[in-house]
Amino acid sequence: MSKRFSIVYRVEPDGSATRLIGRNAWALLELHRMGRCGCTPITTPGPRWSAYVLNLRNLGLSISTIYENHEGKFPGSHARYVLNSSVSILEVVDGKA
């Protein structure tokens, strides 16, 4: 049996350790990894970025949404999500058995 992907994180300076599983865990890890550059559905593909961000905000994390225009064959706009909360990643379980 394989474990699901999960992380344990803490909001600094004095938050308690919290475990996240699945895509929400992946999204927080990517936001943390990308820092002030943030993540977009174009540069960090994921099927439901807006849902992951909403779920993380509901957990009390501060995440900014910056709207950016893009050109190309299908011009339009996309969101860039930037983690504002200071978060420490304490554990990562990759989900592979």
Image (tube, rainbow, N blue to C red):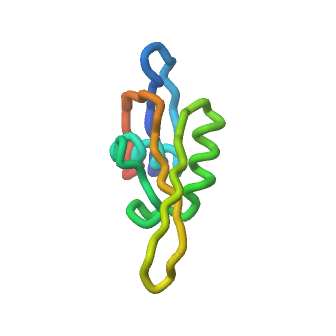
Residue 9 in sight from this viewpoint: yes
- Side (left or right) of 20 relative to 87: right
- Side (left or right) of 30 relative to 59: left
Residue 3 in sight from this viewpoint: no
- Side (left or right) of 93 relative to 77: left
Q: Name the residue rendered at 58%, 60% in the picture.
A: 48
Q: Position of residue 46 (x, y in %)?
A: 49, 62
Q: Name the residue rendered at 53%, 43% in the picture.
A: 64
Q: Name the residue rendered at 40%, 60% in the picture.
A: 44
**How many numbered marks are there?**
0
Q: Name the residue rendered at 37%, 52% in the picture.
A: 96
Residue at the farthest top position: 14
Q: Position of residue 63 (x, y in %)?
A: 53, 40
Q: Position of residue 88 (x, y in %)?
A: 38, 28
Q: Position of residue 19 (x, y in %)?
A: 51, 32
Query: In the depicted view, which residue is nearer to us: 10 or 31?
Result: 31
Q: Is residue 40 above or below residue 18?
A: below
Q: Quadrant of residue 32?
A: top left
